[in-house]
Amino acid sequence: MSELHKFLFDGLPVRGAIVRLTDAWTEILARRAANTATGAWPPPVAELLGEMAAAGALMQSNIKFNGALVLQVFGDGPVKVAVCEVQHDLSLRATAKVMGDVGVSDRLPQLVNVHHQGRCVITLDPKDKFPGQQPYQGVVPLNSIEGHKLTKLSEVLQHYMLQSEQLDTTLVLAADAKVAAGLLIQRLPLEGEGNLAGSMVSRENEAEIGVNEDYNRISILASSLKREELLELDVDTILRRLFWEEKVLRFEPQRPRFACTCSRERVGNMIRGLGREEAESILAERGVIEVGCDFCGQQYRFDPVDAAQLFTSPGDQPPVTSAVQ
Ligand SMILES: [Zn+2]
């Protein structure tokens, strides 16, 4: 079963979280593999997406925020976009759009950052928005400050968290066909609660970057965790091996799971957003409007009667549309 454990280092300004997505991750892969139109993702793409799923769960669990955390990578290589969405209850879904050939040993630069144009977008979309409220969004390039292409997603996200929260963060991520896992270690803010939206940034926090000895020691231990260990060992063994000299306080584990938020109603709204003319032209050509969900593979079919209802129902107004169903 998928699990996420949060922990604190007793008496030290350092917190951590470790996630192992098993059933939640294999469900995402299986649904993609079952999609006859696309087939399974090439392994390097699945690995990137698995790392995003693990990172997304860790980041969602690390903030006090009721809404969806959406991690997106927009690429200029064969992977055009990779998306992972994690809800407050750690239900999650993920997908990627691949157009072009992927090499077996392709990493971040070859997949999404061929021309230095790739970027990672982190969105916090509150559940109960007040009118006109925009989701918070942060954007980071996939290059280092010196302009070198970063090879690991963890480096990109560490950079983002340092920028947005002014907090040192260490991330170790790994994924294969069975497990997507990650370890996060973060220096605790000196005052107030850190928040990805960066609202509580203080000068004191900034001055502490890179110099806190407790954090630095624990970060070095965390960074020694190898990919195979993260993928194969259970949580207790990993924490014991890495931090056997530290006093670690554990919280009750949480259970991430796969869930898709698509619905017939939302797809209907999207078709309404196309406009009656466009919908009728699709019907004239194909006899039916078919929309498949990229996240879960669910197919939605609207025949001419269904479609006519969409445009004559009381809610017959231009709806707000979303690219994500
Ligand atoms: Zn879906």
Image (cartoon, grey):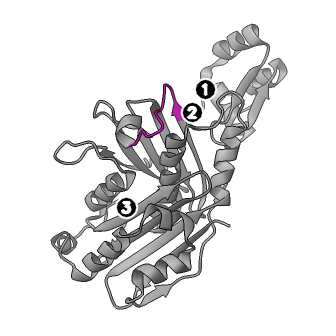
Q: Position of residue 275 (x, y in %)?
A: 63, 19
Q: Is residue 52 visible?
A: yes
Say which residue appears at 57% left-offset and 41% top-offset. 95
Main SS type for the magenta part? loop
Residue type at mark 2: give it.
Thr
Instruction: State the image quarter where residue 168 is shown.
Output: bottom left
Residue type at mark 1: give it.
Gly
Provide the residue designation for mark 3: 196
Q: Is residue 208 above or below residue 280?
A: below
Numbered circle sitting on residue 81:
none
Where, quadrant-wise, is the N terminus in this rendering? bottom right
Q: Is residue 49 above or below residue 179?
A: above
Provide the residue designation for mark 1: 273
Q: Position of residue 311 (x, y in %)?
A: 72, 23
Q: Is mark 1 within 8 Å of ligand 1?
A: no
**Mark 1 and mark 2: Cα distance apart in space:** 6 Å
Local packing at callout 1 (Cα closer than 10 Å; few below 14, some 14-19, many 20+) is some
Q: Earlier in the sequence, mark 3 or mark 2?
A: 3
Residue 23 sits inside the magenta stretch: no
